[in-house]
Image: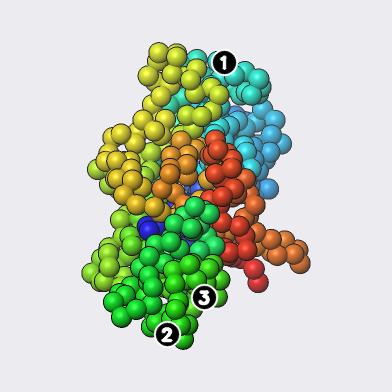
Amino acid sequence: MNRIVLIGNGFDLAHGLPSRYEDFINDYWVKFINEASKQRGGYVKDCVNLQILVSNYTLQVVLRGDNPANYIDLKNSIQQYGSGAKLGIDNEIFKHLSALNQLSWVDIENEYYRFLCYQFDIVKLNNYDKYENVRNLNHDFEYIKQKLKDYLSRLLTEKQVHKSDRIQKIIYSPFNLDEFTEDAKNEWINDEARNIKLFNPIYNRDVISQKTVKLLETVPGTDAEFLKIKMYDRLFWNENFDLRPNDIMFLNFNYTNLEELYIDKKKPVDNKFIPLDIHIHGELNNPNNPIIFGYGDELEDNYKKLENLQDNNYLENIKSIKYLETDNYKRILDFINSDKYQIIILGHSCGNSDRTLLNTLFEHENCVSIKPYYYQYKEGDVIKDNYSEIVRNISRSFTDKKSMRDKVVNKTYTDWFSRSVK
């Protein structure tokens, strides 16, 4: 059996990398404010234009008076000066996103999609500025992509990241029967029972542990049915079997490469294999695997309407189409078709912007286990986690809810992989 390690932004956060959207957008505006405060008159940076319209005002006065730390603070500070100062942003989606608080990257992709669907989904876009031409929307969205690439590239040069022993242990941990669907568990037990067969001199001792050999020797007339019953005993299973993945695929949805901390390409784990490493959304500074940033939910109600518009500009940032520009998606299909597999989730929210791919992975007949590791945090004196939130998001990627309940590992058998509990 194989394993897929599904990596999202929470994986980078667990290694101390400030890669939230909130980190990115605040960094942008802090730098803009610091640069602008050194000027006396107006200041222009890319699509942002800060003007002083009254001669006795200066940027130093406007910006240093209230010490603005982000776009909202800056906007409020400027409003105090009435018509004496003006902030303009020649990028509607960037202006819209700058004004929103506590968004995730999934939220940003969802906001882009709402702009995209404006003309036939006006109810959802009550207060949005309409783009007359979708090419202008894509052009403005490209600006956000480029700034994100610049930010992450700078982070990787400024921050030192280190391997987590806990995450290492999770990635290469052995399987447990309780993590599988009922059918997969029964099939595995039957296979093990067939391996052991009846206790006699010709059974293959190489496929079972020495503990099991000793156990069988103490039970006269041991047969396969007895062994099948015993193997439903969790203690028996844990004591006598050490079932590790035959192969592992790192499926990274980030643009960074922190998963390489856990891949020793010179000395494979247990000398069995070198894990497959796929950046499905591209990599920083790799022209052969360009960044994909957009929307990926073909199950959403409006997607068919977008296709029916007969305008390819509306599909420019649709992930499932972008996947065809490399062989990454084909390599994923080869892996999931090759054998049964478990998915462990490390820091991926499983939000709708990736639902098309997640549906392919989750509902595949070879997927027999989905194990979400969660983030643990403290709120007041109460320790909380996001396990339930991840599972609710996972459920949206399933059309077969019965299958979802069978495949998702319950909280009893999973654990935290990252925490901020002090």
In this rendering, position of residue 264 left or right of residue 233:
left
Q: Nearer the viewer, mark 1 or mark 2?
A: 2
Q: Which mark is residue 203?
A: none
Q: Are marks 1 and 2 in contact (CB under 8 Å)?
A: no
Q: Which residue is mark 2?
A: 217
Q: Which residue is mark 3?
A: 236
Q: Nearer the viewer, mark 3 or mark 1?
A: 3
Give the percent coordinates (x, y) of residue 337: 33, 45
Q: Which residue is mark 1?
A: 120
Rounded to the nearest angstrom, the CA distance separating label 3 from label 1 is 59 Å
Taking depth in this image into account, of 148 and 29 the one nearest to the observer is: 148
Q: Is residue 332 above or below residue 237?
A: above
Q: Quadrant of residue 316?
A: top left
Element at label 3 = helix
In this rendering, position of residue 92 left or right of residue 221:
right
Give the percent coordinates (x, y) of residue 26: 56, 48
Q: Amino acid at mark 1?
A: Phe
Q: Nearer the viewer, mark 2 or mark 3?
A: 2
Rounded to the nearest angstrom, the CA distance separating label 1 from label 2 is 72 Å
Q: Residue at x 66, y 20 (%)?
A: 123
Taking depth in this image into account, of 42 and 212 the one nearest to the observer is: 212
